Amino acid sequence: MTQTGKSYKKRILAVDDAAIILQRIVDTLGKRYEVVTVNSGARALRYLQKEKPDLILLDIRMTPKDGFQTLREIRAMEDRADIPVIMLTGMEDKKYVMEGIKLGICDYVLKPFAPDDLLERIWRALGFGEEKPAPPAEIETEEP
C-alpha cells in the first residue's frame, strides 16, 4: 500500500492490561502493521481523542473500566464509532460474544491466540476479504 508515494501501514490500537499479551500482539503484528499499545480502557479513550486507528484489539477483562464499558464510550465518540473492533478474551462464554455483537464488534478472538488466526481475522476486519494475505517480505518462514 502506498499513500503519496510512501509506504503506509495500517494502524492497530491494542488495549490489554497484561503486558505479556501486548508484547505478543506487537511481536505478531509489528512487521505488517503499526501497533500502538495501551494498558487500560481510559488510556485507549485518551488516545482516541487525538488519533483514529484503522482497527482496535480490545481485551474484555480489565479494571477499572472493562472492554465493554470502553467500547460503549468508543461507539459514542464522534468520528470513532465506525472503527472495527476485535474483542480479545480468555473467557469462552456465549453471553460475552452476544454483548460484543450488540456493541458492533466485527470479531472475537480467544486468548491465547494463534498468530496466524489473529492475522487472518485482522485482514478480514480491515476489509481485505477472504483472500489470505501474503507474508511480508521481511518475515522469514521457517522450514519444517
Image: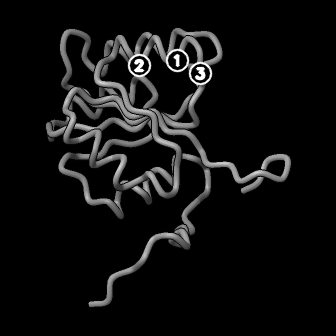
Q: Identify the residue at image location x=56%, y=31%.
A: 53
Residue at label 1? 48
Q: Is 144 placed above or below 52 here?
A: below
**Residue 113 percent location from the top left of the image:** 24, 53
Residue at label 2? 44
Q: Identify the residue at image location x=52%, y=44%.
A: 34
Sequence-wise, which precedes: disc 2 or disc 3?
2
**Residue 116 percent location from the top left of the image:** 36, 64
Q: CA distance from mark 1 to mark 2?
A: 6 Å
Indicate the colouring scheme.
Answer: one colour
65 to the left or right of 42: left
Q: Are marks 3 and 1 in contact (CB under 8 Å)?
A: yes
Question: Looking at this view, is 91 or 26 the one in front?
Answer: 26
Q: CA distance from mark 3 to mark 1?
A: 5 Å
Question: Looking at this view, is 66 or 129 the one in front?
Answer: 66
Q: Are marks 1 and 2 in contact (CB under 8 Å)?
A: yes
**Residue 13 percent location from the top left of the image:** 45, 33
Q: How many marks?
A: 3
